[in-house]
Amino acid sequence: MGELLGVAVLGAGHMGADHIRRLDQVVSGARVAAVADPDAARAKEAVAGVEGVSVHTEAEAALDAPGVGAVLIASPGPAHEEALLAAFARGLPVLCEKPMVPDSAGALRVLEAEARLGRRLAQIGFMRRYDAEYRRLKALLDDGRLGRPLMLHCTHRNVSSPPDFTSAMLIDSSVSHEIDAARWLLGQELTAVTVLRPHPSSGAPAGLLDPQFVVFETDGGALVDVEVFVNCGFGYQVRVEAVCEAGSARVGDEHGVRVTARGSAGTDVPQDYLVRFADAYDREVQDWVDATRRGRVTGPTAWDGYAASVVAEVGVRALEDGTRVPVGLAPRPALYG
Ligand SMILES: NC(=O)c1ccc[n+]([C@@H]2O[C@H](COP(=O)([O-])OP(=O)(O)OC[C@H]3O[C@@H](n4cnc5c(N)ncnc54)[C@H](O)[C@@H]3O)[C@@H](O)[C@H]2O)c1
Ligand SMILES: O[C@H]1[C@H](O)[C@@H](O)[C@H](O)[C@@H](O)[C@H]1O
């Protein structure tokens, strides 16, 4: 099918470099046409060995580079709004890493800008929707075999957090995945957030409120709880159990081969998201490339990105105030009906 899709990758850090490798070596139908990162050395390192790619320090220069037909945004969250609006202004389809825009006012501006265009250009990088286990769980919940979902119990553990990680980021960076996964799995909006916290772990950096226990209410009467613990020290563990009226289903317990030897049994525990969700990222980017080449936009929408930003912002307020805080969403534009 036709010419390769030329992708401009904005941000060449952990995710950007991994997506560049994926576009270059794993995914079919696309090539990396341009990369932008204010850290030029990092950008050059990320594209070492990739043919025909131009390197820029300004995002807009990469968008305007020859051969660019789509954009993958992997810069830090606060840079996403400007990048999304610049892509919309050029009519370029975008895959934007989560969070779409960290603050809800900025997320609303992006939502309204796309709604004004009257057609979707953005897919938001909530990759759990592309994880094989999550997809099986979603199919089970949708076919009704387990009955009405009552609760989701979620666990989200990271081995350690990056040096600049704040207590708010446990919610707006980490729990943003559970916010999206819960909305998607249940097909419901989240309506209120309460955050409880035990004594911080002595393994967490001083001052970081880690772990936290977050409870969401939904407009369908379900409850969602999330244990988020980003300096657990022992592994990258992401689990969810759905408890329904006629049964329960749980994913994420084990990932990999189970070995029994010398009187014990077990599996390796992944140490980070790039390992645990490798297949999900591959499927996400391949689906995005395939859809884009057909002139279509699929996957999580700007509405999903907006809703996640609002709920996360409310969650941060609930953490700070120690109270239950209700969620208020703007009316959903018809484009996302
Ligand atoms: N889906 C996931 O599981 C997942 C995992 C990790 C990170 N992320 C998301 O990916 C994004 C990047 O995270 P990361 O861990 O790669 O961060 P990082 O800090 O490793 O890399 C970010 C890079 O962007 C560059 N940058 C800064 N401003 C820029 C701009 N205006 N234009 C272009 N580049 C710019 C920085 O110099 C840096 O090289 C974030 O939105 C993050 O939340 C998603
Ligand atoms: O940005 C990262 C990323 O989204 C990971 O998937 C998540 O596990 C981390 O907690 C978060 O900080």
Image (cartoon, rainbow, N blue to C red):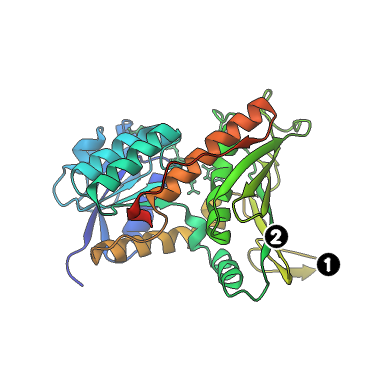
Label 2, residues with CA under 10 Å away: few <14, some 14-19, many ≥20:
some
* Residue at left offset 66%, top offset 63%: 149
Indicate left or right for 283 with 91 as reference: right
Eye-nearest disc, 2 or 1? 2
Distance from mark 2 CB to nearest ligand 2 atom below 8 Å: no
Outermost residue to the left: 66
Residue 102 place in picture, x, y as percent: 45, 35
**The N terminus, quarter of image:** bottom left
* Residue at left offset 29%, top offset 51%: 49
The amino acid at mark 1 is Arg
Indicate left or right for 245 with 111 as reference: right
Which residue is labeled 2 in the image? 150
Question: Quadrant location of ligand 1?
Answer: top left
Q: Which mark is residue 262?
A: 1
Does label 2 or label 1 sit earlier along the sequence?
A: 2
Distance from mark 1 CB to nearest ligand 2 atom below 8 Å: no
- For the residue labelled by badge 2, is the local secondary structure a helix, a strand or a loop? strand
Q: Which mark is residue 310?
A: none
The amino acid at mark 2 is Leu
Residue 263 place in picture, x, y as percent: 86, 67
Indicate left or right for 107 with 3 as reference: right
